[in-house]
Image: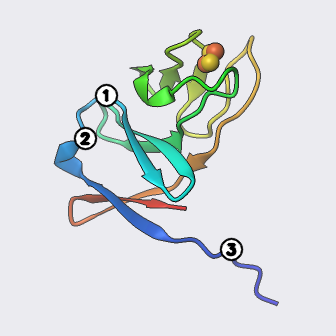
Amino acid sequence: MNKTLKTDLVKVSHIDDLSSQIGKEVKIGDNEIALFKLSSGKIKAIENRCPHKQGPLSQGIISGEYIFCPLHDWKIDLDNGEVQKPDDGCVKTYPVEVIDDFIHIRV
Ligand code: FES
């Protein structure tokens, strides 16, 4: 039996419409996603909701490959969504693909 999960690749933004180090909120169906272009040029997409008290992570501060929640400063790894100690939790991350300068998110 084929157990491959069915996912959709959704075009969300032109790469030039994303400012470096500034989050952008995008919505795909019920998914609210925070999109970031890091200073390294990498693009990251995570759930736009902090596991602490639902802070909007798209408005957080980026440092390296981490986002700091704008409400109470929890530090979250943009690669795997894990909250860093001493806090605890995890947010969903989404695979990103850039095709012909357009950012696509797999949901
Ligand atoms: S809501 Fe994000 S740290 Fe409190």
Q: Secondary structure at mark 3?
A: loop
In the displayed structure, 16 sits above or below 107; it is above
In the depicted view, which residue is nearer to us: 63 or 104?
Answer: 104
The answer to whether 17 appears left or right of 62 in the picture is: left
Q: Quadrant of ligand 1?
A: top right
- Give the residue displayed 70% in from the left and 21% down from the top: 52
Front-most of 57 and 85?
Answer: 57
Reply above or below: 2 against 19. Answer: below
The residue under label 2 is: 18
Image coordinates of residue 31 in percent, x first then y, are 55, 51
Q: Which mark is residue 22?
A: 1
Instruction: Point out residue 103 in the picture as x, y percentages from the top left corner.
Output: 32, 56
Helix or strand or loop: what does disc 2 sit on?
Answer: loop
* Rendered location of residue 9, percent (x, y): 45, 69
Q: Residues within 10 Å of mark 1 (few under 14, many from 20)?
A: some
Q: Earlier in the sequence, mark 3 or mark 2?
A: 3
Q: Residue furthest front?
A: 30
- Is the residue indicated by label 2 positioned so its CB lies within 8 Å of ligand 1? no
- Name the amino acid, label 1: Ile
Instruction: Please give the label number shown on residue 47.
Output: none
Give the residue displayed 74% in from the left and 15% down from the top: 87
Position of residue 37 in the picture relative to residue 83 (left or right): left
Q: What secondary structure is found at the residue carrying circle 1?
A: loop
The answer to whether the residue labelled 3 contacts the one labelled 1, judged by CB atoms less than 8 Å apart, is no
Dot 2 amino acid type: Leu
Query: Residue at 40% of width from left, 46% of height from top?
Result: 26
Cβ–Cβ under 8 Å for marks 1 and 2: yes
Residue identifier under label 3: 5
Q: Residues under labels 3 and 2: Cα distance?
A: 29 Å
Mark 3: amino acid: Leu
Disc 3 crowd rating (10 Å Cα; few below 14, some 14-19, many 20+) is: few
First in sequence: mark 3 vs mark 1: 3
